[in-house]
Amino acid sequence: MTASRTILVTGCSSGIGLATAQTLARQGWRVLATVRRLEDAIQGEGIETLLLDQTDSAAVQACAAEALARCEGQLDAVFCNAGLGVPGAVEDLSRDAMRFQFETNVFGTIELINALLPAIRRQGHGRILINSSILGFAAMPYRGAYNASKYALEGFADTLRQELIGTDIHVSLIEPGPIASRFRANAQAQFARWIDAQSSVHRLAYQAMAARLAKAGPAAPFTLPASAVADVASRCLNARYPAARYRVTIPTRVFWYLKRLLPTRWLDWIALKASGDEPGYVYGRKP
């Protein structure tokens, strides 16, 4: 490992982004870490902070320009991790809620990659890591907006990987399952912002969902610490020929195979059970 390699990691206020930035910095990488607010800057780690709000196109362009300026155009890798979830039933999602979900998870990510790619092409090599999810290939109830955004990211990543064949620029998807982070707390805030729970036919199910989101500690079996994703990202970055996908946690690997083996109806039933957020009618309850 040489100290000359530079990576831009987005979404480093907490969780996966923070753990990845710290892990790579310890391994000798020069880490440029983005946060939405200066007060979330990583302290005492030798990590450089940049501001980035992925819903703001001007902020995305400014962040890309600043990152390239700091490393004099020699950016070896980018880990697009920043994102959030807007929970709620599909029929309760407004256009504005969906737009916010996609501006954050999809449009901001793609715009950032596109802003960095010309410099990466000029240097002739690079790694692009995109943080997806088990929900990027396995749908679960009350996660429609997030599901759709991660499915979209997977489609973009697969296409970009094909378009970069013949170069030494590699695109990889990281697909975590349950990870200990502030994701649930952030999702709870987004639910309160966008969903009118009391007026919804899903209000009974929302009560159970609210309890899950508010639960302290792991809310699902086989939950791993954020460092598990950081270790996989490091492995991907150091591989001579990185894989197209890296699945993190047992549930992710299990669902990957189940989706290929089981009829859709069976998979739906398993997803309902695994989600912890079953619609009320599953139990014959009336809204």
Image (cartoon, rainbow, N blue to C red):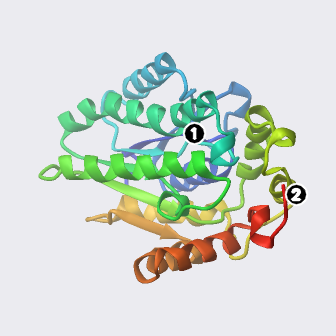
According to the picture, the residue beneath numbered tag 2 turns out to be 211
Direction top: furthest residue: 58
Quadrant of the rendered image containing residue 270: bottom right
Q: Is residue 36 above or below residue 17?
A: above
Name which residue lies at 53% across and 29% down.
Answer: 54
Residue 260, position as x, y percentages in the image: 40, 78
Specify few, some or many for label 1: CA neighbours under 10 Å numbering under 14, 14-19, or 20 or more. Answer: some
* Res. 1 visible in picture: no
- Of residues 136 and 160, the one nearer the viewer is 136
According to the picture, the residue beneath numbered tag 1 turns out to be 47
Mark closer to the chain start, 1 or 2: 1
SS state under label 2: helix
SS state under label 1: loop
Q: Quadrant of the N terminus?
A: bottom left
How many numbered discs?
A: 2
Quadrant of the rendered image containing residue 45: top right
Q: Quadrant of the C terminus?
A: bottom right
Report the side of 209 relative to 46 (left or right): right
Residue 4, position as x, y percentages in the image: 36, 44
Name which residue lies at 41% across and 26% down.
Answer: 64
Q: Is residue 187 above or below residue 241?
A: above
Q: Amino acid at mark 2?
A: Ala
Residue 144, position as x, y percentages in the image: 59, 50
- Of residues 131 and 208, the one nearer the viewer is 208
Rounded to the nearest angstrom, the CA distance separating label 1 from label 2 is: 36 Å
Quadrant of the rendered image containing residue 225: bottom right
Report the side of 266 relative to 239 (left or right): right
Q: Amino acid at mark 1?
A: Ile
Report the side of 256 relative to 5 (left or right): right
Q: Name the mark nearer the viewer: 1 or 2.
A: 2
